[in-house]
Image (spheres, rainbow, N blue to C red):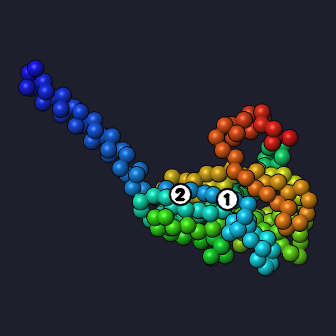
Amino acid sequence: MDSELIIALGTLVATIILGILAQILPWYRSPQLEVDFKNREPFCQHYPPGYWMRLEVRNKGQKTAHHVTGSLIEIRRADYTLLPLRSFFDLNWCVAEEPVPVSLRPSEKSFLDLVVIREDDPDTLRVQTSIPAQQRQSSLPCDTYFFRVEVYAEDAKPAKALYHVTWPVAGMDQVRMRRIRGIERALLRLGLHPLRK
């Protein structure tokens, strides 16, 4: 085989490998946000003034995620019709009690307050926000809902999650929530999922 051909092929292969690494390494080293929830402590806690349901946000990446914020983007009814909201809800970090951005180092986690059932109003599920205009439209009666949550950071891809919230009867310990993923989510959008009533 001709040595010039071998050198040309080697140069081509090296260029392709370097191009692939240039795409993969920034992704591998960047912050990667993950949202999680389970129907147990510390995600669900009875703490005055009520029963709190919180989402865990974790940075699984190699670098610190800066200015991390979470929002409840949409609320849908059991039949998957969209509730008319004037805007999305900025969620509070449970450590800050207001929707201020936080930074998460690699492997660090924090909790976003999603909803609370207050002791003085056990028939209402409230989206936990400290913005006054949003507080007025954040009360939901006993029913079934779908919540779409997105968590953003200035240097990471958004983490998105869809949750099925069931609350058949009033009471702090009656509400349940689970994540809808993959094919189940696609079936829900198409109207073919049994959860959609």
The residue most toward the left is 3
Which residue: 89% across, 76% down? Answer: 120
Q: Amino acid at mark 2?
A: Leu
Q: Nearer the viewer, residue 127 or 171?
A: 171
Residue 37's disc number: 1
Across and down, in percent, residue 140 comes to 85, 60
Q: Amino acid at mark 1?
A: Phe
Q: Based on the displayed image, in which of its 4 quarters is residue 22 positioned?
A: top left
Which residue: 69% across, 59% down? Answer: 38
Q: Based on the displayed image, in which of its 4 quarters is residue 135 positioned?
A: bottom right
The residue most toward the top is 1
Between marks 2 and 1 in the image, the one whose residue lies nearer the viewer? 1
Callout 1 crowding tier (Cα within 10 Å): few <14, some 14–19, many ≥20: some
Tag 2 near tag 1, CB within 8 Å: no
Quadrant of image for the N terminus = top left
Residue 196 to residue 166: above or below = above
Residue 59 to residue 102: above or below = above
Q: Secondary structure at mark 1?
A: loop
Quadrant of image for the C terminus = top right
Q: Nearer the viewer, residue 113 or 175?
A: 175
Q: Based on the displayed image, in which of its 4 quarters is residue 130 positioned?
A: bottom right
Residue 42 to residue 166: above or below = below
Across and down, in percent, residue 32 comes to 49, 56
**Residue 23 seen from this side:** yes
Which residue: 76% across, 50% down? Answer: 164
Callout 2 crowding tier (Cα within 10 Å): few <14, some 14–19, many ≥20: many
Residue highlighted by disc 2: 33
Alpha-carbon span between mark 2 and mark 1? 14 Å
